[in-house]
Image (tube, rainbow, N blue to C red):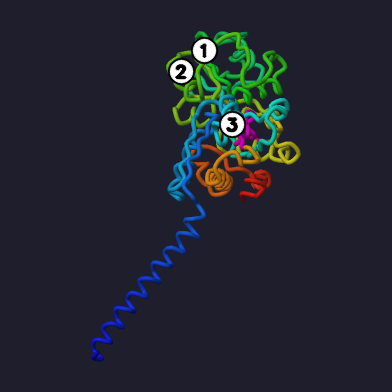
């Protein structure tokens, strides 16, 4: 064989070896990197309160992890909890933590703070924009049906600069089992001496129109002159629905803003170190918006009941939520988690296991 032919064969062999090396490197990359994340579909649902933010999270996470498909249904906190109990949801969103009896009946569920927000008292009054002053007692009397006109002397007395109309008040409240209702009624139970309806995800409202979800309250309120309702700050702000300033424990009428809600969560954060389910409404502090709450993701500690790939996807997504996911919060009018609360969430997420092995 000529030298020229041997040289040509050598080049072919060299090219072949390089190709084999590249293929091997690609296989190694796939098995080591991509193989660590198997395709998985995660189904979740619950609170409408954080729905805009969770929708953003699932979209952004899918861009980073195309093999992971996560859907979240905005069905209310109560339905979310029930879906988790039945294990039709892989995790649930809930604005209200589980009660002692729920925990006893459904042991092994973790509470993961995901974000927080303000519950605003929004209204539809002709020629009246945001900034009407309200107190806890006045809010209580409105939602109990004791104050029925917008020009009621009690409202007029703390709003001397407003010309309030002789217009009937139409209460709009949640018809579904709602963590927003729980936060709102817990605030009134804590802050008002005249509130008699108790607190919870549902209460026996004596008056008003029921609507499902924060979006339902917002839509109904926009169509109802004289209407008043409670809903998460994002839904009021995003739909240009006026909302009230509320008297806080420091004697200030405070407008719900990202700043005033963040101050409330920062003041409340230490309570979660002793009890992650602690009520954080009506916190003291300068500039604190009093109807502010944390909202939670609920997930079973032991995820062995689902496919392992799905369990890993749930754990990794929730870890991302409390870290990188927080960068999307403020643009959607949700405050970032205080660093002390992130630490609590990390501790809880590290308890996630699959067949006895930690998932994180």
State which mark lies toward you, 3 or 2.
Answer: 3
Q: Residues within 10 Å of mark 1 (few under 14, many from 20)?
A: some
Percent x, y of residue 55: 47, 37
Residue 229 within the magenta-colored segment of the rendering: no
Q: Residues within 10 Å of mark 3 (few under 14, many from 20)?
A: many
Furthest residue in direction right, as rendered = 274
Q: CA distance from mark 1 to mark 3?
A: 29 Å
Whether residues under marks 3 and 2 lie with C-beta atoms below 8 angstroms apart, the answer is no
Q: Secondary structure at mark 1?
A: strand
Q: Secondary structure at mark 2?
A: helix
Percent x, y of residue 57: 49, 42
User: Residue 84, which numbered label?
Assistant: 3
Q: Is residue 305 left or right of residue 267?
A: left
Q: Could you say which is closer to the camera, residue 256 or residue 195?
A: 195
* 345 shown above or below 36: above
Q: Read off the residue under disc 2.
A: 220
Q: Name the N-terminal-most of marks 1 and 3.
A: 3
Percent x, y of residue 158: 61, 19
Furthest residue in direction front, as rendered = 1
Q: CA distance from mark 3 to mark 2?
A: 29 Å
Q: Secondary structure at mark 3?
A: helix
Q: CA distance from mark 2 to mark 1?
A: 9 Å
- Place residue 171 in its image quadrant: top right
Q: Residues within 10 Å of mark 2 (few under 14, many from 20)?
A: many
User: Residue 184, which numbered label?
Assistant: none
* 102 shown above or below 111: above
Q: Read off the residue under disc 1.
A: 209
State which mark lies toward you, 1 or 3.
Answer: 3
Magenta part of the chain: 286-299
Can residue 326 be seen here? The reply is no
Can residue 69 be seen here? The reply is yes
* Residue at x 53%, y 43% (from the top left corner): 310
């Amino acid at each position: 064989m000529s030298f020229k032919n041997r040289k040509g064969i050598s080049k072919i062999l060299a090219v072949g070896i390089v190709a084999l090396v590249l293929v091997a490197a690609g296989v190694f990359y796939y098995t080591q990197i991509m193989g660590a994340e198997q395709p998985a579909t995660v189904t979740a649902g619950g609170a409408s309160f954080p729905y805009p933010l969770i929708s953003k999270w699932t979209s952004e996470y899918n861009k980073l992890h195309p093999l992971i498909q996560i859907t979240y249904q905005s069905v209310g906190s109560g339905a979310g909890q029930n879906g988790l109990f039945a294990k039709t949801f892989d995790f649930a969103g809930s604005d209200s933590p589980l009660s002692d009896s729920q925990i006893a009946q459904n042991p092994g569920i973790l509470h993961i703070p995901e974000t927080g927000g303000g519950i605003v008292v929004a209204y539809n009054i002709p020629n009246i924009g945001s900034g009407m002053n309200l107190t806890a007692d006045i809010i209580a009397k409105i939602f109990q049906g004791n104050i029925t006109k917008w020009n009621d002397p009690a409202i007029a007395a703390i709003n001397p600069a407003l010309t309030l109309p002789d217009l009937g008040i139409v209460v709009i409240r949640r018809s579904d089992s709602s963590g927003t209702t729980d936060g709102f009624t817990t605030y009134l139970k804590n802050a008002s001496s005249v509130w008699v309806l108790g607190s919870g995800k549902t209460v026996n409202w004596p008056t008003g129109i029921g609507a499902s979800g924060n979006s339902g309250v917002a839509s109904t309120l926009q169509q109802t002159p004289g209407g008043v309702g409670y809903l998460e700050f994002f839904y009021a702000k995003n739909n240009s629905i006026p909302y009230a300033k509320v008297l806080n424990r420091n004697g200030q009428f405070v407008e719900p803003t990202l700043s005033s809600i963040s101050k409330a969560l920062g003041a409340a954060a230490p309570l979660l170190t002793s009890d992650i389910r602690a009520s954080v409404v009506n916190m003291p502090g300068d500039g604190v918006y009093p109807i502010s709450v944390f909202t939670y993701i609920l997930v079973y500690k032991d995820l062995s009941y689902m496919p392992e790939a799905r369990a890993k996807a749930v754990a990794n997504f929730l870890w991302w939520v409390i870290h990188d996911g927080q960068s999307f919060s403020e643009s959607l009018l949700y405050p970032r988690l205080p660093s002390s609360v992130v630490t609590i969430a990390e501790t809880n997420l590290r308890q996630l296991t699959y067949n006895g092995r930690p998932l994180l």
